[in-house]
Amino acid sequence: MKWFPSFGSQRRSRELQDEIDAHLQMAIADRVARGETEETARQAAMREFGNIPLVQDVTGDMWGRAWLEQLGRDVRYAFRQLRKSPGFAITATAMLAVAICANSTVFSWIDGTMLRPIPGARDAGDLVSLQRGERNFSPVPPLSYLDYRDLREQNHTLTGMLAYHHDWITLTGGAQPERVFIANVSANYFNVLGIKPMKGRFFLPEEETGPAIPNVVLSYSLWKTRYAGDPAIVGKSIEVSRHPLTVIGVAPEGVVGAMPGLRDDLWVTLDPLGNDAWRMTHRDGGAVWLNVIGRLRPGVSRGQATQDLDTVMRNIVAAYPNQHLGDNRITLDPMWRSPFGANGYMAATLPILLAFAAVVLLLTCANVATLTLVRFVSRRRELAIRQSLGANRIQLVRQMVLEGVVLSIVAGAVALALTTWTSKTFAWFFRASSSPGTLNGSMDLNVVIGIALFSLLAGMLCGALPAWRSAHAPAVEVLKAESASISGGSRNRKLLSGLVVAQIALSLPLLLCSGLLLRTLRNLAGANPGFEQDHILTATVGLNIAGYSNNEVQLIRHKILDRVSALPGVKVASFTDWIPMTLGHKAEDAYPEGYVPHPHESLQVYHAEVAARYFESLHIPILEGREFTPDDDEKAPRVLILDQTAARRYWPGQDPLGKTLRIWGRLFTVVGVARNSTHMFVNESPQPMVYMSFFQEGYENIVQVETEGNPVDMAPAVENALHQIDARLPVFDVRPMRESTQLASSFAVMESTLAGMFALIGLVLAVTGIYGVVAYRTQLRTHEIGLRVALGASRRDVLRLVLLQGVWLTGVGLALGLAFALGLTRVIARLLYGIGANDPVTMVCVVTVLGAMSLVACYFPARRAMLRNPVTAIREL
Amino acid sequence: MNEKDHYKNRIELLQGTLDMLILQTLQWGPQHGYGIVQALRLRSGDVLQVETGSLYPALHRLERQGWVQSEWKQSESKQKARYYRITAKGKKQLASDLGRWERIVEAIGSVMYVKPEESAS
């Protein structure tokens, strides 16, 4: 078996052989010439020459034998050793593979999301995401076009600054309208991202502000799927929302836009049809609609850029104070934790999961090191013989480390194969929703490098400890002592004990965290969100994007309500433009009439637009005043319903009915107060919410139906009813409310699933670890125990002797583990709901489970020792 | 201590000297390994018996250091053998080895033949 053929050294050793042959021939010839017979001459010459292989070996060393060749020999030796104990090799490889795979899987998720926030973008590390006002976990778009333009033109720290607005729209023109995701973008959008068109061109600066030109850029996947990769697509016209747009370019494969985790299918300029002049020329209210990403100048830090942009923003605020009420501070985030899109959630979850996985890897290394050490003790004789035959310590240490490395490389290869699959399981945690999620792990070079590093680390850890031991074992002592070996030497005992303690100490925090997260998940599932979600069906109707006039839209909305309400099995039908607990919300500044806000005071509230009977269908009680009625339409005075939090915020201790709030510069009269309900997450701190009347301010059209039976059964009937009104009506996302709201617990599910899996691995490893060590040590003490029994020790004494050992190790491990766990649970405190990070019940449960399992693991070897016949035990050596 | 270490130590012990002797032998013309052994034995009056276990490692080391060059040639007895030739660099090395050797011999000599009264003063 040639692992590392090294031609130079092969040639040299062949030549040396020839040279030695020549030497011998000449020596023989000389002797023959002096009268010796051929045979005696040959023998004498050989004798005189000495040990030929040794000469070859030493001479080869002069050339500094190719280290690769030496490595190859060691690797081959390591493989031979591992093949000799397949049980150990397979167990260790499997454990390491699982542990490495746990790490690489989480890492592939980080790599696919946080490390590649904008696929296709150049140097994404230089990109920063801009937020205005109070820092928020899920902010709304921060800037109006004019503010954006001023910031872009007046800053000194960015090489470019792009703006976009993500939305959805329908592709008409085909048989059925198709929903696509679209972004209105600044003309420099692709330029700032550093993306070149695959076909055609991207937008020109004059297209941003000049007369509207209805141009569109397609994503690669849309071009491929909807337009069959038409090579002549550039210049053709496509129909979007019944408006013709001209395709000017196609983005390269994989480019999905600048909002991390969400997909755009098309890009148009900010006002492609020229019908949105209002939004382009105002600085407040509905004109604040753009998300902004900047690219830092080389050498400029994020802090400097923040300061620079903040200064510019202050000037803008000073120039237009009335359009900038509230908090206007600018903050910048790197894209990996950009709060726009998915990365804010990712950054809060994935690093913690990676930390869990790292603990699993450490735990596994401790376990494999235990196995290696036990195996090493049984190989002491072999190593001692090798040492006395001339292997030096360095060689032996290298050999031991190499065995660990070989194991972990094989394990790494297995993990690599597994990860190609597990990296894609990330998407499982996100249910189908109305967002075009593109979240998934990615399997690229980063992950391969990561796996290599994880494996190398694991290999060093698994091999280094036994190697350190082997370097300290004096050969002669070992050879002498072997026959009288009692319990593997006190040094080994200490190291083995240390490893067992480490395993218990590492698995305890894993178990504790998973216990806390699982209970969090149960609490989340059991929590009352404050609204009915079991008999509700929602369906999104693409009305305003389908190209209807405003009057038509209102007419169709009423028709929808009439038709759907009349369906058998439907209790109540209503409209809303927002579904709670779906990772999204809308927010706006709201001021009580006559209230003068302090400068930079933020009075942001969540808002939703809901139609009559919305509260009735969701079973949200109206505590004061009334619900909306069909009369609260465009012609009627603007009205509001507050939730309790909003009522308390604006009019604490007063009756809010009849009071007014100014939103978008318009006055709304409060007509009711609804009970608080969950908006985003069950574990959120309550945010004030104002409900406006759907027929006054509603934009998106979501039909909300309370059903008598299972809402899924009603889906076809509802869809049918909608299509009867107009067959071309785009209808999407017809699903039960419960399915939508599960989106809010996606991360809790992910966290508890992974933590649970990791904890299970940890438990198994810790228990097998302590079992293995106690069993091994008891076996080594068979003779001693036999003697004790023969001398009068009772079986109970034997049991106590062995168990005590295990109890001692477990106790120390648990104590250390608790200390470690208290540190780690603090990290996950933010992820918990309805349970404290130091919850005593969970802690006691986990300690009991781990302690009991460890004791059971110790009991078996103890029992075996106890039942042993002392006579055979003494004889056995 | 194993056999290999034993050889290595012998080389170390003789290193400077053996190198010098080999280079000196090659001064008289290219020679193969066997020839060098014979030449050293003859010139030293059978006193210096260079072991092959020292000679070949030394030759290969000298070649790596660029002090000798080797090529395969036919010997007078039609035997194909590897001939070593001293290089210019090797000649320089020989000169410096020789200088050092002479100083050592002189130094050892002055220690060994020192007059008793001188050492007493």
Image (cartoon, coloured by chain):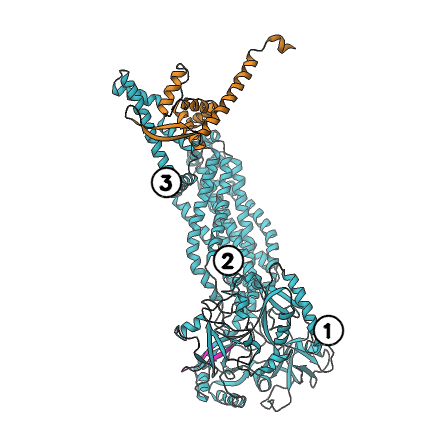
Chain colours: A cyan, B orange
Question: Marks 3 and 1: same chain?
Answer: yes
- Label 1, on which residue? A599
Taking depth in this image into account, of A180 and A582 the one nearest to the observer is: A180
Chain letter of disc 3 in the image: A
Please say whether residue A176 is one of the residues in the magenta stretch: yes
Q: Which residue is at the front of the view, A485 or A828?
A: A828
Q: Given the image, what chain letter belongs to the residue carrying mark 2?
A: A
SS of the residue at dot 2? helix
Image height of A279 relative to A469, above or below: below
Please report contact status of discs 2 and 1: CB closer than 8 Å, yes or no.
no
Sequence-first disc among 3 and 1: 3
Of labels 2 and 3, the one closer to you: 3
Q: Which residue is drawn at 54% across and 14% down?
A: B109
Residue at the image position 48 percent from the left and 64 percent from the top? A440
The residue carrying mark 3 is A7
Q: What residue type is labelled 2?
A: Phe
Alpha-carbon span between mark 3 and mark 1: 78 Å
Provide the secondary structure element on which disc 3 rests: helix
Q: In the picture, residue A236 is in which quadrant?
A: bottom left
Please tell me the numbered disc located at residue B103.
none
**What range is drawn magenta here?**
A168-179
